[in-house]
Image (cartoon, helix red, strand yellow):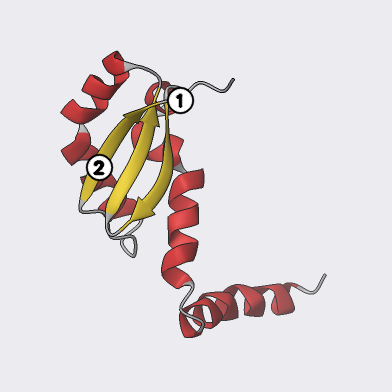
Amino acid sequence: MDTKSSARVGEILPRVLELLGLDNRFEEVKLMRGWAEVVGPVIAQRSRPRMLRDGILFIEVENSVWMQELWFHQKQIIDRIKKEYPKVEVKGIRLEIERENG
């Protein structure tokens, strides 16, 4: 593969996403996939972002203990998201206990 053409795709893709109005959505997906980098591996094993709606990030947590832990750290989590994903607007966090399947 020609490195010049791949560099051009890397330069063009963000602009195309922006023109299509998908750049913010792309950043949201990156946030969801990069959750462990935002909260660290221990919290990431016990929580997961479910969706972002109207600036509220819905997060499922393993149990009430982890709900309390994330509630305590929610400002730091939002600040970290704003730093790492500035195009993603997170104004607040809503914590929910994970639903069991079955």
Amino acid type at image mark 2:
Ile
Crowd around label 2: few <14 · some 14–19 · many ≥20 (10 Å): some
* Quarter-of-image position of residue 96: top left
> Viewer-nearest of labels 1 and 2?
1
Does residue 75 appear to the left or right of 18 in the view shown?
left
- The picture places residue 3, in percent across and down from the top left corner, at 73, 72
- The disc at residue 36 is none
Amino acid type at image mark 1:
Arg
Mark 1 residue element? loop
Quarter the C terminus occupies: top right
Residue drawn 48% across and 53% down?
Answer: 30
**Residue highlighted by disc 1:** 99
Does residue 72 appear to the left or right of 82 in the view shown?
left
* Quarter-of-image position of residue 85: bottom left
**Residue highlighted by disc 2:** 93
Mark 1 or mark 2: name the one nearer the start of the chain.
2
